[in-house]
Image: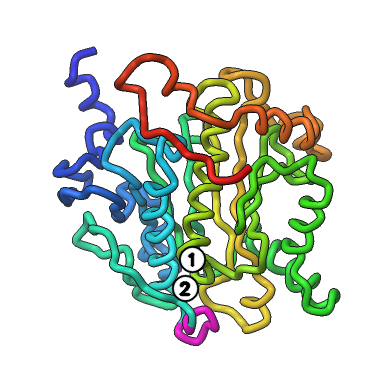
Amino acid sequence: MPDNVLDDISHRRYNPLRGNARAAGDKNPDYESTMVFVNDYSAVKEDQADYEPRDEPGSALIGKPSHNLTLADLTPQQILPVIKTWTELYTYHLSPSSPLAKVAKPIPMPPVASAQDPTRPTQQLRYMQIFENKGAAMGCSNPHPHGQIWTTTGLPEEADLELTNLEKYHREQGGSHMLVDYAQLEVAKTQRIIYSNSSFLVLCPWWGIWPFETMILPSQHKRSLVDLSESEQLDLANAIADITRRYDNLFETQFPYSMGIHQAPLEGSDTEIEASSLHLHFYPPLLRSATVKKFLVGYEMMAEPQRDITPEQAAARLRSCGGELYRNKLGNPSLKTEPFQQQEK
C-alpha cells in the first residue's frame, strides 16, 4: 500500500505519534509514557451552537507512544502510569467540597499536547466518564490504542441509575455497600471468578448481557480512584493486564471491547459519595470466534436481552486462557511484548 493512501484517512494522518501535528494544528510532545490531549473529534464540547455551555471538551489519553501496544501487551508496571493519570484527571475535576478532595493526592501530570489544557476545568462539573473503545467493532476509528475522558454537568443515565440503587441499598441495609457484598458472595461461590489478587476481583457478573462481559470489583469499599493506595493501584493494573490478555488469548485476536470506570461523581452530597463504589465494566461483543459477534437485535431489542452462554461458562473459558499472550508465542519478534508475570489467580 502506498504511504500516501494513508494520508487520506484523517485519523491515521493526524495520529498521536511523538512530534506529529494534530488536526487542530497542535504538535505532540516527545512523550515516553502517558499523554493527554483534547480530542480532535470531540463529541462533548464546552461551547456548542444553540446550547448553553454544558460540558468540558472531551479528552483522549495515550498510554504509550507505540502504535501496536494495547493494554493486553503492557505489563502491570506499564499500565500503572495510565491509572495514575486517570486518578490525577479525576482529582483535578473534584469539587473542593467533596469528601474525596480531602484524601486525594495529586501527582505530576503527563505532557499535554494542546494549547488548551484538558486537565484544568473551567467550571465545576458533576461527572467524569473514563472509558476505552478497543477495535473497529466498537467504533474505534484511530488505530493508536487510546482511552477517552468525558466530563459533564449532569449525571448520565447509566451512572444515575447505578447511584440511585447503590444509595437505596446503602440506606436499607444499615450502611452496607452493594458491590462489596456482591463481591463477597462471588468469592463464596467461586464459579464466576476469573482472577483475584489482594485488592481486586475479575468476574463474569450474574446479570451480564454480553457473552464474555466482565467486571473488576475491589474487595473492600472504594468510592473512587483517589481511595486507592499505591499497592492497590498496582493490584488494579494487574487485574486489567490479566483480563485483557485473557480476552486476546480466547480467540487469538485483538479482542474488541468497551471498558469504562464507574465511581463517585465529581460533585455530590456526602450520602452520594459514600454510597458510590468504584468498579470497571468490560463489554466485549465477540461470541464464538474472532469473526462472530453477538448482536442485540429482534427479541433482545423489543423485549429483553438473552444470554448465548451462561456467565459460569464464560468464566470457565476465560480462566483457561491465562498465561503468556498468544502473539508472543508466534515467533515474530515484531509482535512480541514484555513477558507478563501473573501475581495471583
Q: Nearer the viewer, residue 168 or 104?
A: 104
Dot 2, how many residues are within 10 Å of its Cα: few (below 14), some (14-19), or many (20+)? many
Separation of marks 2 and 1 at Cα, in angstroms: 6 Å
The reply to whether the magenta stretch includes residue 100 is yes
* Amino acid type assigned to the residue bearing label 2 in the image: Leu
- The residue positioned 77% from the left and 29% from the top of the image is 298
Residue that extends furthest to the bottom in the rendered view of this protein: 97
Q: Amino acid at mark 1?
A: Thr
The reply, left or right, for residue 302 in relation to residue 197 is right
Which residue is at a point 18% across and 19% down the rendered structure image? 3
If you read the primary sequence from the N terminus, does the residue marked by circle 2 or circle 1 appear first? 2
User: In this picture, is 158 found above or below 303?
Assistant: below
As helix, strand or loop, the secondary structure at mark 1 comes to strand
Instruction: Tell whether position 228 is magenta.
Output: no
Where does label 2 land, which residue?
Answer: 125
Residue 62 pos. (x, y %): 33, 47
Tell me whether the residue at label 2 lies in contact with that at label 1, contact meaning CB atoms closer than 8 angstroms: yes
Residue 272 at x, y percent in the picture: 65, 77
Q: Which residue is mark 1?
A: 152
25 to the left or right of 16:
left
68 or 16, which lies in front?
A: 68
The magenta segment is: 96-102
Residue 69 placement, left or right of 196: left
Please, which colouring scheme is shown? Answer: rainbow
Residue 63 appears anywhere in the view: yes
Residue depicted at 84% across the width and 74% down the height: 173
Image quadrant occupied by the C terminus: top right
Q: Is residue 222 above or below residue 249?
A: below
